[in-house]
Image: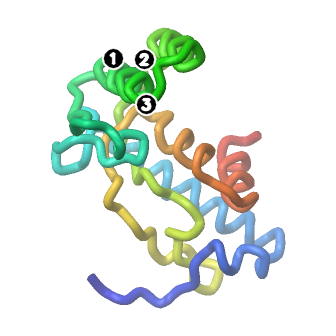
Amino acid sequence: MEYIDGDCLEDVWEDFDLEQKEDIISQFKRILDELRSLEGMFIGCVDHTHCEDVLFSETETPRGPYSSEEEFSQGIIDTLLEKEATAFPRLVCEMVKDILNGHKIVLTHGDFLPRNILVKDCKVVAILDWEMAGWYPEYWEYTKIMHTVSTAIFKELVQRRNGE
């Protein structure tokens, strides 16, 4: 591991003006596009082991790797039902079966949050915290960001990245 000089994006976001924010958003988009251009043949960690994700962290057995998105969706369903098998999770699980299929499997960071992005002089200089990286359906990074983000910073980044 080496030291990289930079500031945590979460700590300095409000110091930037609109033009600088737009520049960082453009850099963020290029990084995500580059990651998503790399396609995988399975779903799981980059070293071909189980999915290293907080969703699966409390399960009795490791989930994955999966050979298809259908298997991955079933893993999500099994995990949700293991945690709570009431009517609402069962309804969500039925929707998962119908909606989450047909996506490309792409390289995903898995914890792409402002606290894991270093910037210096308005340039992204490093992305930290890769232990959850793996091959996941193309929607996974966006879902993870929108589920875990608690600040307006990343919602702004993601919404602008997606043209919303």
Side (left or right) of 112 relative to 21: left
Tell me the distance, in whole angstroms, between the alpha carbons under discs 3 and 1.
20 Å
Q: Position of residue 112 (x, y in %)?
A: 50, 57
Q: Which comes before the other along the chain, label 2 or label 1?
A: 1
Q: Earlier in the sequence, mark 2 or mark 3?
A: 3
Q: In the rendering, which numbered label is found on residue 70? A: 1
In the image, taking residue 161 as reference, residue 79 lies left or right, namely left
- Mark closer to the chain start, 3 or 1: 1
Query: The residue under label 3 is which amino acid type?
Result: Lys
Task: Report the residue at 48% width, 16% height from top.
Answer: 93
Which residue, given by chain and number where applicable, does mark 3 sit on?
83
Query: Residue 145: percent from the left, percent from the top?
Result: 57, 49
Which amino acid type corresponds to the residue marked 2 in the rendered image? Asn
Scheme by which the image is coloured: rainbow
Measured as percent of width and height from the top left, residue 138 is found at: 45, 35
Query: Tags 2 and 1 in contact by the CB under 8 Å rule?
Result: yes
Amino acid type indicated by mark 1: Glu
